[in-house]
Structures are given as C-alpha cells and as structure tokens.
Image: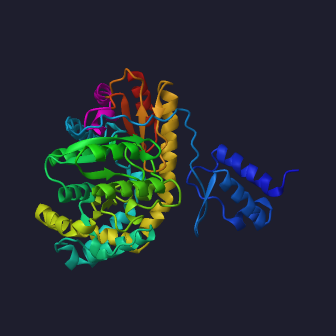
C-alpha cells in the first residue's frame, strides 16, 4: 500500500516531468504544500526528502526546496583529451578577435562568446549601485584606488572567501581589471619569457592569448570532461619538462564545465608542491555551480601551498564592471608592483558599486536565482543540440557555468564551420582556438546563457544544415 508521502512525492514528480516546476524553481513552502494537498507538514517534509534523495530537489539553507538539474542528455561525453605532451608556442589566436567583434553585431546570434545575456544578470541592481557610488561616495569615486584597491571591497571579498572555506585577510587581496588581468599578473609574477606553463587541454582561449603575449610556451595536459586535469599526465610532465607554473580551473572550467573532486585538488597541490611549481587557480565560475553547495577552491585546501588565486565578478554579476581580484600569496609585492606600473589602478566607481552589492546581500540573492537559470539554460541547449545535430556527436555534461563542449563527426572542420556560420548570422567558438597546438578540429563550444527564442532554434538548425 502506497504511503501518503510517497503518493505526494509521485504527484510532485509528475509535475516536474510535465514542466509545471522547472529547474531552479522554488517549490511551495512546507506549510503551503500542507494546506494545498491536505496533508500534514511531516508528510510534506518526507515527500520533499524522498524527491531530494532521488535527485529531483535540493534543499537550500533558510530558503527551501528547489528543482535541481537532472541530465537528460542522450549523447555520450567526449573522451579524455590527448594532446602532445611537449611544450609549444601559442599560435593562431587571431580568429578570437573576430569572435569577440561579432558580439557587437545585433544581427548575429551569439553562441560563441561566453558572455551572459542581460537576462542572466542583475542589471537594475548594478545600475542603482553605480549611481549610488557616484553620488554618495564622490571623494572615493573621483580618486585613484591605487593597488591593492578599495579597502571596503577587499574586506567584503575576504569575508566571502572565508565563507567558502578559504580564510583570507583583506590585505592579501589585490583588485584587478577582471580575471584576465589577474591571470596576466600571476603569470608575469612567476615566469619569464621562454618558460613552460602547464595548462588544461582544452583551455580557455583568453589564457592562451596571455601566454602568447608573454612569450611563454604552453604544455597541454590531458583533461577528463568530468574530473579535470589528468594527474598522472601532469606528474609525467613535471618530471620531464622545466615547468615554471601550472594554470587550472578546478571549479566548472571553460569549456568543459567539470568540477574537480577535492581529493584530486589535494593531489594536484601535492604534486606541484613537490616540484616547487606554483598553481595559478582561476575560479571565475566557482559561484555558478548548479548545486547549492559552493565547491571549495584549491587555495582553501592547503594554506601553505603556493597558489595564486584569481577570480572575478564578470560572469556572475556584470562583465562591463571589469572587477576581479587576485590573492597571490607570497608573490603579493611583485604583483602589486606589476599592477601599478601596468595601469595604476582599477576604476573606483565599479569597485564601490560591487562593494555595495555585496554588503546589501543583492549579490547572494542574485546567485540563488541565477544558478537554476544557468542549469536550465544548459539543459535546454543540450537537448536542442541533440535534437538538431547528427546522432554521432558527444557533449559534455557540465556541473556549473553556462557553456557546452561538443565533439562533432570526425570529418568536420570547425574553423570552416565557424566561417560559414558567421556568414549566415551565427557565431560559434571553433575548437582549435582552445588549444596551443590547434587541436580539436572537430569540436565547438556553445554558450547557453542566451535569451531563448525562435532565433536560437533557427541558428541551431542552420548549424545542423552546414554540418
């Protein structure tokens, strides 16, 4: 005989399958559900707990139960990457500029650049904070915020880092112009031209551009689409080559979207520590996991490890603010000097505005809402790609962020595909720009953080036709 809570759970499950409750939606409160369904609060609790165990819901502290992402992907994941384990100069990144310029054209469907559409950002809150920063803090707003940056913003960032298991003093933080400058400063602090840097493969093309601009060589390390850097391959590379730094994105990397297990993070720190190689940790997507539990950074797992932690609010709050930060550990003085001689300071008004968004709690409220929206967007794009594209494709199943990495049939040249697609009004990111050695010829990355409408469906149909 079916219990009352099991019957209620089945009814709610059917509602989730039917789309009455979508990924990221908040379920009715316990008392409201009790009144609506004519059951006790205890029965409502047991029903929600059953759905939580089945993976349909997630409980968020002091907030309630939310519908969580359930993968419906029918395509397998790409295999572990297999780059050549030897250093190489970065080349062929000029196509990236064309990709970036396409974001300004309103007639082009933007699936290439990893820039969230305005619908995924707290635009009104940002606008109000910018106005308040200029009006209420005129002295601070009109002055240089010389390195290390605005004290109040650094205090609030330090508080947030402590909350995610990474205790940090405000004086250890330096504000940057986004995460890109943080990565550049980190690499300049620990390398010289000609040095070898170990990176994930595939890797974010912005990092490859930095490596190219600094005259460094990239050593691509095989990377698993679900667990990240192959530690065995990294160990072999450290034994064979004079690696001076390692750059990794352990939490929801771009383009794979994986979340490295904590055990792997600890082993990564151990391997690098034994070799005397600093880790440059890019945590720009760390706040955008689909689960309520925010993963810890590597830096929080070993306070003694040589980690230069880099992050930004560009993906989670607003790209245009250009507010990022770096916690460079023992390299602070060097990074501070490089920041000062590079551009004196990060703009004061955005720093004050971000501090206000953090202090008021608006940033955290935005995160609670947008995580589910990104999860739903990735699920929707994945299902649409499977619906439109040839059957023999492979797709990553990210646990955070808002991009997917697609392996196309072997004969496809994604650079050609990108050129033809752009001519027909669709922007995509071809695979070779994610590799120093121009690998991933038959791969593409798509951004899912777009306003979904008929244009997106037509764009995917266009890509399928070109394939």
Residue 171 in the image, given as x and y percentages of width and height: 27, 75
Q: Residue at x 66, y 44 (%)?
A: 17
Hey, which quadrant is residue 19 in on the image? top right
**In the image as oriented, which residue stretches furthest toward the right?**
1
**Is residue 174 found left or right of 50 in the rendered image?**
left
Hey, which quadrant is residue 269 in on the image? bottom left
**Frontmost residue, 212 versus 418:** 212
Q: Considering only vertical position in the picture, is 321 above or below 234?
A: below
Q: Residue at x 52, y 61 (%)?
A: 293
Look at the image and tell me whether residue 193 can be seen. Answer: yes
Residue 364 in the image, given as x and y percentages of width and height: 45, 66
**In the image as oriented, which residue stretches furthest toward the top?**
411
Q: Considering only vertical position in the picture, is 235 above or below 368?
A: above
Residue 113 in the image, given as x and y percentages of width and height: 32, 43
Q: Residue at x 52, y 33 (%)?
A: 76
Q: Considering only vertical position in the picture, is 159 above or below 21?
A: below
**Is residue 445 found left or right of 4 in the rendered image?**
left
Residue 129 in the image, given as x and y percentages of width and height: 33, 69
**Frontmost residue, 246 versus 323:** 246
Q: Residue at x 50, y 61 (%)?
A: 368
Q: Considering only vertical position in the picture, is 160 above or below 246?
A: below
The quadrant the C terminus occupies is top left
Q: Is residue 352 shown in magenta?
A: no
Look at the image and tell me whether residue 257 can be seen. Answer: no
Image: magenta residue range? 415-439
């Amino acid at each position: 005989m079916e219990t009352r809570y099991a019957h209620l759970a089945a009814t709610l499950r059917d509602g989730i399958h039917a789309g009455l409750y979508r990924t990221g939606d908040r379920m009715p409160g316990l008392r409201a559900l009790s009144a609506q369904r004519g059951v006790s609060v205890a029965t409502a609790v047991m029903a929600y707990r059953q759905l939580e165990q089945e993976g349909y819901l997630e409980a968020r502290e002091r907030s309630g139960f939310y519908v969580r992402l359930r993968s419906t992907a029918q395509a397998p994941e790409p295999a572990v990457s297999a780059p050549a384990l030897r250093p190489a100069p970065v080349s062929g990144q000029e196509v990236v500029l064309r990709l970036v310029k396409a974001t300004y054209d309103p007639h082009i469907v933007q699936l290439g650049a990893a820039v969230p559409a305005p619908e995924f950002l707290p635009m009104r809150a940002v606008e109000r904070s910018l106005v308040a920063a200029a009006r209420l803090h005129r002295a601070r707003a009109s002055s240089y915020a010389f390195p290390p940056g605005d004290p109040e913003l650094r205090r609030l960032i330090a508080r947030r880092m402590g909350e995610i298991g990474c205790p940090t003093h405000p004086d250890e933080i330096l504000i940057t112009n986004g995460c890109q400058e943080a990565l550049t400063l980190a690499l300049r602090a620990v390398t010289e031209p000609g040095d070898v840097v170990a990176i994930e493969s595939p890797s974010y093309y912005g990092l490859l551009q930095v490596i190219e601009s600094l005259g460094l060589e990239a050593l691509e390390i095989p990377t698993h689409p679900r667990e990240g850097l192959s530690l065995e391959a990294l160990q072999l590379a450290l034994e064979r080559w004079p690696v001076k730094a390692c750059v990794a994105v352990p939490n929801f990397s771009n383009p794979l979207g994986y979340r490295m297990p904590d055990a792997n993070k600890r082993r990564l720190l151990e391997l690098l520590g034994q070799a005397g190689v600093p880790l440059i940790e890019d945590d720009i997507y760390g706040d955008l996991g689909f689960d309520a539990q925010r993963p810890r950074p590597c830096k929080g797992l070993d306070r003694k490890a040589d980690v230069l932690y880099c992050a930004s609010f560009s993906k989670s709050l607003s790209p245009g603010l250009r507010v990022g930060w770096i916690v460079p550990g023992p390299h602070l003085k060097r990074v501070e000097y490089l920041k000062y001689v590079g551009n004196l300071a990060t703009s004061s008004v955005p720093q004050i505005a971000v501090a206000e968004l953090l202090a008021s709690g608006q940033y955290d409220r935005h995160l609670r809402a947008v995580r589910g929206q990104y999860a739903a967007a990735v699920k929707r794009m994945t299902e649409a790609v499977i619906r439109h594209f040839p059957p023999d494709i492979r797709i990553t199943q990210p646990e955070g962020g808002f991009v997917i990495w697609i392996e196309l049939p072997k004969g496809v040249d994604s650079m050609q595909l990108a050129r033809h697609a752009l001519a027909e009004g669709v922007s995509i990111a071809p695979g070779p720009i994610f590799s120093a050695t121009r690998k991933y010829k038959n791969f593409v990355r798509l951004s899912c953080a777009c306003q979904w409408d008929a244009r997106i469906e037509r764009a995917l149909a266009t890509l399928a036709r070109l394939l």
